[in-house]
Amino acid sequence: MSAADVKVSGFGTGALTRTNTSDVLFSRPLQAGGVGTKPRTGVDSNVGLQVDAGINGWLSVTGQGLVRKLETDTYNATATLAFAKARLSDNVSVRAGRVPLAIFLVSDYRNVGYANTMLRPSQEVYAQVPNDSLDGADIDWRQDLGASSLTTQFAYGRSSAKVAGETLTFTNARVLNLILDQGPFAVRLGRAEATLALEQGGYALPKAKVSFTALGLTLDWRNVVVQSEFTKAQAPGADTKAWYAMGGYRFGKLLPFVSHSRMTGDITQTTDSVGLRWDAFRSADIKFQLDRVKPRDGGLFNQAGPAFRGPVTVGAIAVDFVF
C-alpha cells in the first residue's frame, strides 16, 4: 500500500440554532441538551474526518470519527465507522466492523450536512431509530434490471447508544433492504428486527423484541427534488408511525424547499418546515431553515414540563462543507 492508496476527506457543519421559547429544549435525537431562546451551536454543528485505504484490488479499510454534542451537552469525539470492505465481484461486496446502520434513505450520510437538502433529517422519522452505526457485518448484492438496478442489502450485528443516563443496546439486529434505482428515481424498502436491552439508572429492564419498517423514495429530475419516507417502529412504550415529504425546486445555485413531518402513536408531533439551500461555493453551502413544531405532551423535546403544549418555532442557519 502506497500513499496514493490512502484518501483523507472530511466534512462538517457550523450552525446557529434557536427557538422562541425557554419552556423546553429543542434537540436532535439522543442529544442530552438542546437549545431555547439563546442561539447555540451544539444542536446542528459537527465535524468529521474519514480515512479510506486500499490494501489491494479487492480489499480496503475505512475509518471515520465525528465530533458533536450527543450523550452529554459537550462536544465529544466518537468513532462512527471502522470497517474492512471486500469486493467479491463487480456486483457483490462485504463489510465487517462498525458499519452504517442502513435503515433510512440517508443512513450512509445522515451526519454529512452537505449531502442533504434539508438542514437536518426529519425529527419525527429519524428519532425512531437514533443509532447510526452497527457493530457487525453487511453484504450488498447489485443486479442490473434493464435500465434499472436492484441492490439487496443484509446486515447483522449490535448497536448501542447512551443518553440521559440510559443505555440502549440492540442485539441480534437483522436488517434487510431492497433499493431500486432508475435514473433520477430511487425507492427503498427496509425491515429491521432486534432485541432491545435498556439500562436505566444502573438497572437493567426486561429485554424486548423491537422492529422497524421503512419505505422511502427520492427524485432528483432536472430542477425538481423530492424526498419522502414512511416508517413504523414497534417497541415497548414507543410504538409509532411517522412520515415526511419534502419538495424543492432549483433556481441556479438556490434550492428553496418545504417539508411536512408527522409522528403518531405513543409519541405525537408534527413539523412544518421551509428552507433554502444556497450552493455558494464549490465545496460548501449555506442553509436557512424555519420549523414550526407542534408536539403533544412534550413530543420529542427535552425537559418538557407537564404544562407545556407548544407549538415551538425553531430557526437555524448553517454552513456545510466538505474537503
Image: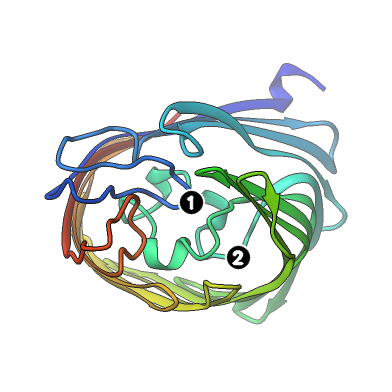
Q: In this view, does 56 lie above or below 275?
A: above
**Mark with earlier residue (1, 2):** 2
Determine if residue 151 is in view: no
The residue depicted at 18 percent of the width and 35 percent of the height is 39
Q: Where does the image place residue 126, in percent across and percent down from the top left?
A: 46, 62
Q: Distance between the residues labelled 1 and 2?
A: 11 Å
1 and 2 marks in contact (CB < 8 Å)? no
Task: Give, as a three-letter code, the residue at label 2.
Answer: Ile
Which of 49/59 is in front?
49
Please say if 4 is above or below 54.
above
Quarter of the figure with the N terminus: top right
Q: Quadrant of residue 85?
A: top right
**Image mark for residue 170:** none
Q: Residue furthest left?
A: 20
Quarter where residue 207 is shown: bottom right
**Circle 1 residue:** 110
Crowding at dot 2, Cα within 10 Å, few <14 / some 14-19 / many 20+, comes out as many
User: Where 111 falls versus 152 (above or below)?
Assistant: above
x then y, percent, for residue 319: 28, 36
Asked whether 151 or 306 is in front, the reply is: 306
Q: Where is residue 220 in the image (x, y as percent from the top left)?
A: 38, 68
Residue position marked by numbered label 2 in the rendering: 103
Q: Which residue is drawn at 46% across and 75% down?
A: 217
